[in-house]
Image: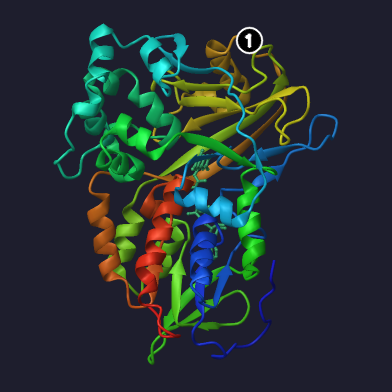
Amino acid sequence: MAGGPRGGVDGNRDSARIIVLGGGISGLLAAWHLRQRGCPVEVWEASDAPGGWAQTLPWPGPAGEGGYLERGPQGLLVNRDSAVDRLLRDLALDLRPPQPKGPRWLGRAGRRGPSPATLSGLLRTPGLGLAGKLRLLAEPFIPKGTTPDETLQTFFARRLGAGFARELLPAMVAGVLAAPPECLGLEALPRLQRLEARGGLLLGSLRAGPARTRLPVGGTGALARALAERLGCVITRRPVRTLERRPEGGWRVHGEGPVREAAAVVLALPAQVAAELLRPLAPEASRILGAIPRLDLRVWHSRHAMVPGWERGIGLLLHPPEGHGLLGAVSFAADDPRGVPGLLQLRAYVGGAYPVAPALEAWPGLFRELRRWLPELGEAVQVREEACPGAFPLLEPGHGARVARLEADLPPGLHWLGAARFGPGIPDLAEGIAAWAESASGLLVAGRHL
Ligand SMILES: Cc1cc2nc3c(=O)[nH]c(=O)nc-3n(C[C@H](O)[C@H](O)[C@H](O)COP(=O)(O)OP(=O)(O)OC[C@H]3O[C@@H](n4cnc5c(N)ncnc54)[C@H](O)[C@@H]3O)c2cc1C
């Protein structure tokens, strides 16, 4: 990564500079769009590598073989011509061709049934009676919602029926957002609003084209690495400490190393870090940001002997609270270059907004719970736990209004982006940050910014 100037105050050599704080996917995307618009930009990242949660970390196999784990996403769900699709094309990243998928299940009422994530799975899934399945067919005829601050629960009940919202939705939402659908606003999955605007879940999806899981060769972390390399201005081990407003306009950024001056600053930091920085500058914005609940998730990675039939990977979602805090598990395909040949690499999600049974705090208890749903699974040959504190923001109903109030309190030249604003999905972050850059670009006038 690029090294910044060392020692002293840097002065105002480049008054047009924009400093992006945080080198996770949000910060890298913000810098990417600013750079595309000709802005001199620099990214400060506190840790020694860019990517934030989106990193592919080495995890050698039992005999020291090369192997990896994903800190965050295992793949990127990409719609044709979406912001993330355009990004992958612009970066010319090598992508693995789409692979056929192994079995996908939903665990409910002590049994595992087909996952309702596909149409055929939805029609075969137990837990939804004939009336519930017939109700699904009415979805294209349901008009667009008019209630402000709808929850995910009421949205799905309206579009797909109360049976779907009660029996299937909690597991699907827990598996993606680690929280109950009645606590989340539609802003947590902005894609739903876009689909509804295009005719509903079915017609909107048909119009948007199929969504495919795309996987950069080298894992999802390859996206962050490619962005950082192409930008060439990501300074690692450079945590920001405070921001100072210059009387003549613009900002002074204090952190490790020299003080830097900037025309504008973009906060792409974890919400609590951004809230702390904003406290003396924008107390109301800081208060709103600090009040967005953050969910702690724990992820257990494990390697097991391959189970015949699971070579293409598996997916399991559990209906809360039946998993006692275990939300689901997912595995790589056997030929995935991130895995260790011959072994099944699993990861299990625990916690989020759900209480965790004490037995699930350690691997043996978690393994027993996993075996309840996946009896084929043999003992683990390797286990590793990764904590994800605060990784998932809980975007409650009314989030849009909160964001508007927060934005209104920000001083000129200060911007705030990230998962707590756009939702944790990387495709949603990509969409939100592309739209932010588009709207901000009118203000990026020859060195006098934002
Ligand atoms: C286990 C897990 C599974 C996930 N699965 C999926 C999935 O399947 N699909 C999907 O789309 N998304 C998924 N996500 C969510 C997605 O990975 C995140 O929402 C996204 O990566 C957040 O990016 P960000 O840049 O906004 O935040 P972060 O990744 O948190 O980046 C913030 C950056 O700021 C840096 N920073 C902190 N303090 C300072 C400071 N003082 N100065 C400078 N820098 C600082 C941090 O080091 C970090 O690099 C998952 C996340 C997790 C944890």
Image vertical order of residue 41 relative to residue 216, above or below = below
Report the front residue among 46 and 193: 193
Foreground of the two, 236 or 300: 236
Q: Residue furthest left?
A: 146
Provide residue 66's location: percent of width, then percent of height.
Answer: 80, 38
| Residue drawn at point x = 51 percent, y = 48 percent | 85
Query: For residue 342, which quarter of the picture?
Result: top right
Quadrant containing the N terminus is bottom right
Disc 1, SS: loop
Q: Is mark 1 within 8 Å of ligand 1?
A: no
Q: Is residue 236 above or below residue 204?
A: below
Please rate how many residues cluster around mark 1, counting C-alpha atoms within 10 Å: few if below 14, some from 14 to 19, many from 20.
few
Question: Is residue 185 among the parts visible in the rendering?
Answer: no
Which quarter of the picture shows residue 356? top left
Does 40 appear above or below 175?
below
Name the side, left or right, on which 335 lies relative to 408. Answer: right
The image shows residue 329 at horizontal and vertical percentages of 54, 25
From the top left corner, tell me how far across and down residue 181 is, in percent: 31, 32
> Could you say which quadrant of the image residue 235 lies in?
bottom right
Image location (x, y in percent) of residue 104: 51, 19
| Residue at image point 61% right, 51% down | 223
